[in-house]
Each structure stands twice: as C-alpha cells, then as structure tokens.
Image (spheres, grey):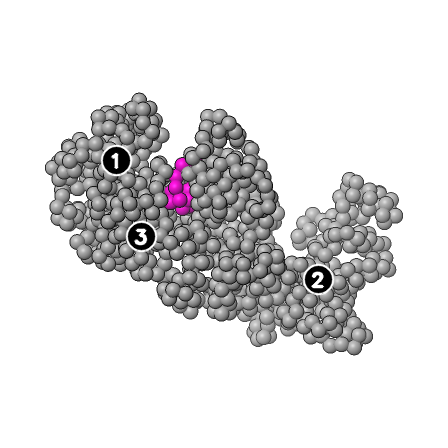
Amino acid sequence: MNQSVYFFGGGTAEGTKDMKAVLGGKGANLAEMTNLGVPVPPGFTIGCAICIDYLRDRTVPDALRHEVEESLRRLEKVTEKGFGDPHHPLLVSVRSGAPVSMPGMMETILNLGLNDRTVQGLARASGNQRFAYDSYRRFIQMYGDVVLGVPFAQFEHLLGAKRLTAGVKSDSELDEQTLRNLVEEYKSLVRATTGHDFPMDPTIQLWGAIEAVWRSWTLKKAVDYRKVNGIADTLGTGVNVVSMVFGNLGEDSGTGVAFTRDPSTGEKKFYGEFLVNAQGEDVVAGIRTPLSIDEMSSRLPEAYDELRLTEQRLEQHFRDMQDIEFTVERGRLYLLQTRTGKRTAAAAVRIATEMVDEGIIDTATAVLRVAPEQLDQLLHPVIDSGVRAVPLCTGLPASPGAASGVVVFDPDVAVHRAAGGEQVILVRDETTPEDFHGIVAARAVLTARGGMTSHAAVVARGMGKCAVVGCREIHVDLDHRRFSVGETNVAEGDWITVDGATGKVYLGDLPTVPSEVVQVIRGTRAPASAPAYQAFARLLGWADGVRRLKVRANADTPNDARVARGFGAEGIGLCRTEHMFFEGERITAMREMIVARDEGGRRRALAKLLPMQRADFEGIFEAMDGLPVTIRLLDPPLHEFLPHGGEESKLLARTLGLPRADLARIVESLRETNPMLGHRGCRLGITYPEITEMQGRAIFEAAVRAKRRGIDVRPEIMIPLVAVVAEFDNQRSILERVAQEVLGGMGEEVAYTIGTMIELPRAALTADEIAKSAEFFSFGTNDLTQTTFGLSRDDAGRFLPNYVDRGILPDDPFQVLDRNGVGKLIGFAVSAGRSVRPELKVGICGEHGGEPRSVKFCHTIGLDYVSCSPYRVPIARLAAAHAALESTAPDKARSS
C-alpha cells in the first residue's frame, strides 16, 4: 500500500516543503521546519488524497487506521507520554492543511485526548489545576461544536454567565473551581443536545476529529473561499495531528502570530501580536485583543530573541514573507506553522521589489510573486486628505483602502443587499470564517474586537478589502441592529466611511481622491514623491522584459488614450466610434442622419458629424504617437441612438422639425426583436455606404492632419460583425476608395491596414477565406461568447450565477474566456487565417483581454496582443508576463 501518513519529530521528517500537493501546505512546512532544526512539536500528517477518498466513500480504510496507530506509537515514544495515559497524557491538536492556504476556512481542534481521568494527569504533570481545567473546557467546547454539532453560541452563553457571576471581564480571570463547574455544565449541554455523553475514549475522539476536518472541506465557508480564489475542489485537505504545547500555563507562557514583514505595507519590520497565558485560537479568532509583538521582548525576552532569529532564518529559507504561528510553553518557544503570508497589493509589490534589492530573489521570481488581479487594489481611491471630518472612532488599520457604504450586521444581509446593488459595510463584534461570504459581498469590514492578525484582518488583506479591526469604542447591539460610540448610535442602513490606511471610521459618505499610482498616471503627482508608484513601475518594467504578448487598450477618447498610455498600453486595440456620437450636438446630428428620408438627407447630417469624428481621431492619434490605433466602424443598431418616448422625443421632434407621430413611426420601424443579431455592424455600412464613407474620410483626414504635425500615425480600420467575406470586401472597397480620394487630394501617404472583428462563429470557421482580404483579426470575445453559447449577455445574469454555483459551468463565460468552446473557435480561426496569411496580426478586444486566465490562454494560442480597458492594462501586462514565465519555466513558476 502507498504511504498515507507522514511522521515528523525527533529532528527528522518524512516530508519536505516541496510536498504540498501530498501533505498540504501546513504539513509540508512542519516537515521542512523539523528538518531545519526549528523547534516544532512532533506529530504526523495524513495526506490530502485521503480526504477526497473519504468524502466519496464515507469510510476509513483499515490500512489507514493501522498507519495512524503506528504513528501514534512513534509520537508517544518521542514525547515520552501516552495517548490516554492518566498519569502522563499525550494531548494533540488536529488541524487542517490544504495544498493552497485557506486561512480559517476549515476546522481545528485543540487539547484532544482529555477526559475525566487524563485531566487529572495533566494537572499533576503541570502542577496547575486551573490550567488543566481551562484546557478541558476549551476542548469540550471546540470538539462539541466541530464534531458533535452543538452550537458554539450555547457554550459561549454558559461561559459568559460564568464571567458575569464571577464579576470578571476575561476568561483568563476565572478560577479553578469555576472552570471545573463549567466543564460539568458543558458535558450536560452535550448530553442534552446530542442525546449522548461526551466521548471519553481518546481514540474515538481522534477519529471523530479527523473525520470532521475532512468534512470541513465541504463547509460553505471553505467552498466559497475556493470559488473566490480559484482553488480546485479536487485538492482535498491534509490532517495534521501534532502533540500539544500550551500557551495557557501561566505568565511565562503565551501564543501569537507574526509576519516577517508588515503584510499591510510591506515594510521590512517584524510584525505581529501575542497573548500571555492563552492558546492560539484566542489570537486568530479575536477573542481577546492581543498585545503588540514588540511587548513580547519584555514579557518573554528569551523566547522573543529566539523567535526573531527563527523568523529571519525562515524568510531566508523560504525566500518569501512568512506568516508564523508560535507558542511559548514555560519560556520555551515552539513553532506551530509557517506559511507564505497573505498581503495587500501594495505590500506584495514592495516586498517583491525589495527582496530583489536584498538579493533574496531574482526579477523573474518577483514578477511571479504578485498576482495580476492584485494590482487593481493599487488603483482604488483613498479618502480626500482635504476633507474636514471628525472621526467617529479609530481602530487598527488592518487592510488599506477607503470604502463607504450602508452598515449591515449580518453576512447574509450583506450578500442580499449587495446583490441588490447597494454598497455595504459589514460591522461585527468579531468575524469568524462563517462570515466569509459576507466579507466577499461587503466593500469593507469593521470589527469591535480582534487584532491585526485576527480572522477579519487576514482575510480582508488577502482579498484586497478595506478593513478596520479592534475598534474598542464600538458597542455592537445586534438585537436593535445598531452600534454605538458613546452617545452616537449608528443604525443598520446608515452610511459610514472606513479608512483602512489610518483605522479611522467616519459618519456619512466621504469624498475620495485617486490613489497614488493613478495620480502619477494622470500627471497630478510627481513620480519621485510616490514610492508606491515607483515600486509598481519597477515590477511592471520587469514584467515587460519577459512577456511576448503585447497589451493594448480599449479607448474611445483622447483622454482615455492618454491614461491608457500612462498605464503602459502599446496601442489602442478598440476605439468604438459610436461612443463619440452620444454627447452634445453630436447626438442631434446622428439622430438627424437616422431619421433622414433619403440619402441626401443622410449625407447632409453626416457632413455635420465628419469634423467631430475627425477631431476625435486626431486627438487619439496624437495621444498614441508611434503606436497602432484600431478604429472600429459603427457597430450598434441605429435605434440605440433614438429616444423612446417622453420629453426627449418631444424635444427631438421639435429640433428636427418633425411631427411627433412621424418620429414615433420611424423609431418603431427601427425596433428589432433581437437587435444583437440584427441590423448592425457591417450590415449598416452595406445598407448605408455613406456612413462608412464618412467614417473612413474622418479617419484618413485626421491621419494626414496629425502626420503634418509630426505625429507618427498608425491607423488600423476594423470592420465589425462580418459573417461572410463578401461583406468584408464590400466595406473594404469603400474604405480604399475614400483613402485614395483623401490621401491623393491632400498629397500625403499614410500606411494603414484594414481588418475585421471576429465575433460570429461563421467568421471563425471561415477565417481562411476572410484572411485573404483582411490584414488583421481582432476577436470580439463579448459577442463571440454570446453567439457561441446562444446567450444574451444582458439577460444571462439571471441564471448564470446558478450555473456556476451548481458546477454546470466552471465560470461565467463573460468573465473568464471559455477555452473549450469559444477558445477552440479562436484557436481554429488563428490557424486557418495564418494558413493563408502567415503574417496575420491577431488579438482580442473583449472584456477578457484584462482577465488573467484569459490572457494566459491568449499567450498559449499565439495571439499577438490583448486589449482591455485602460485601468486593466497593468493587470494584463503582469498576466502576460506570468504566462510567458510559466510556459518557459513551469517548475519555477510553481515554486514562486
């Protein structure tokens, strides 16, 4: 039989850090630390694959039980304790650990092995009766909740009553007798709730805990986390059984969580929190507000010094910022976990660039260290420093950014109201992993308790959510759906603003300003005064040095083009000419053209539009000096430009000198049952060639004017919605005739290309025919997805989320490119097109052009470029670099 259980302890381990797929991240790193000689409590790990087998079969193989029994015997030998021994009891923790870190999303049980006999042995061995019963009540509470299904709140109610009766504020102040009584009350609660006594056999306890950890892979919070973070459901979780060390033995003991660098800013400083006389869950769950890690140097100085040396050693060894859990038992340090620390985007970029400067990693590794989608966080607005507002309260700045929204107190309410289009701020006493779906829906999180390493802080940072935690001035009143700060009450539905960079909370919806990076891009801030921008620019410079795929932008105005170029766009992949018609006098002229009774009337209206279009194109050519500009001819159906009743129709009829009835008749005549597949795109240009003529004239005249001003113009004209090559040839002939007239008449030469937008399956399947005439293809993946799936993008939102939830589709195909369907059409079209025109330039210009997984696919099939909105350009640049590095050095990419 293949090995399923892997032991670590006594200075050696049966695993390494490279075995995360087998052991899970926690198990692999426990083994690695053991091999390094780091003080780690001994234990063993059950491999991840067993979890998936168990969830399928719901049985535990006898061979696995035998392996676990053998590992327990080894653990007893190493620790010189006995599992279930009433004199020298071995107690263990049972914890999850998936191949990809999922902090707090699965179950943990501590102090397992305690019963009415072993608690006496623990008391004698420790010389501390209070500690023994504190550990026992913790075990019953945790096991009762996780394994036996007794609601956690019922245990908390009994515990709260004991604090109230004793007149104390914290659990650590309860005396031994109170804890003894609490243990009995807990056991009675279990009996009353389950109909059975609390299990006293340690072996039964152990297997109950192991199976509960496996089942926790399917908990809603875990499933939601995997969905949000793109983690496969097939990985499973390892189970780590580790001998207990105790931070709740007294004032010479404690527990904490620390990061080798600041996970919020990336600053190179030791960062973390700890508690004296506590167990680990007290810190990460926010049950008690912890102390700064700096205070540990005076409270537990020897352990602190060893911790500092160890954290530096681990960062050097793993070559990345580490998130460390530790316990001090009677002055002796133990590490319970190390993993790659979750961090904000600003921290990720800073850590990556500074580690290059420190010689820890190379530039390729630095590029791979930052997830492309993380860069979006650096573009989020911040609160305007010029706003004069008095903070309502101040907490700990757990995750930067600024967000405003209505207060909600329940994660389900957050999901419901956010789905209705509201901006919400989730306010809790403290968050737990069960709140994860509410955190996803909220703009920000605010908690009354917890520290910088609490659940809310860690999860928010990992997701790029603004968060303020440990705001002690807040009193949360769930019964009345409000929170109060002094005499001020804030009810559910009231607006607040949260500043995750300063920890300040304000009443109302405060104005924001662009982020540091955006200010530099817009030219309102000097790069030298913006360190975040400098790190951002360095990282993307390294990315540009390794990527093959070009990145363009979708931009319709000169200002959009300038912003796109500031973000590093290498041209415009989609300029939508129809967007230029929707403002001021332009829309009136456009409407005049549409309602004209004959060609002469249309040409007179188009003559008014010509100088407007020409000026726009000239401005875009200027902004993109030396870079290609792909201009799509008019695409939407004409009815979209007309009003549909009301005062606007009345005003238009008066402006155009038409009876309202005539206008209504024209509007009705243009109405289509399915406009997405109707009279639009090249079909309009074929029916009304004067439209194509005007747009072509505007493009060529703008190109000549710009060229005469010394601008390097590179126009690419794109004909939309082509289904058959004859449509393309029809429109191309018009454009070439106009080009000859304009360029010949103005005595200039301008190089240009004419291509098409592939957005219909037939066009993809006949790409070899079209490529004989078209000089480039740009895949309009929004419409190609619609026409391939037979879905209306505007209507599919009603049921697509359900398809994704039920596993019918892996992702919303309008967000992540469908490789197996749409992707095959694109790949076929690329191959077919290049079979007749080897130099054919191909790219995509749908929303997928800025989605990292879709960008990777575009790299894989050999596209020349992707095009996306200006603010997605940095994400696409980094995603293209990831794709290049992963294709050339996949092992290095995985290790990063």
> Where is residue 228 shown, x and y percent of the image?
45, 48
274 relative position to 596: left or right: left
Distance in Å between CA atoms under marks 1 and 2: 69 Å
> Where is residue 213 shown, x and y percent of the image?
30, 43
The label shown at residue 338 is: 3
Q: Secondary structure at mark 2?
A: loop
Q: Mark 2 or 3 closer to N-term?
A: 3
The residue under the point 59% across, 43% down is 387
Q: Is residue 847 visible?
A: no
Of residues 683 and 146, the one nearer the viewer is 146
Q: Identity of the amino acid at label 3? A: Thr
Q: Is residue 396 visible?
A: yes
Quarter holding the C terminus is bottom left
The label shown at residue 882 is: none
Q: Identity of the amino acid at label 2? A: Leu
Identify the residue position indicated by label 2 in the image. 633
The residue under the point 71% across, 63% down is 619
Asked if 724 appears above or below 78 in the picture, the reply is: below
Q: How many neighbours does mark 2 have within 10 angstroms: few (below 14), some (14-19), or many (20 or more)? A: many
Q: Secondary structure at mark 3?
A: strand
Magenta-drawn segment:
448-459
> Where is residue 426 shown, x and y percent of the image?
48, 38
The label shown at residue 139 is: 1
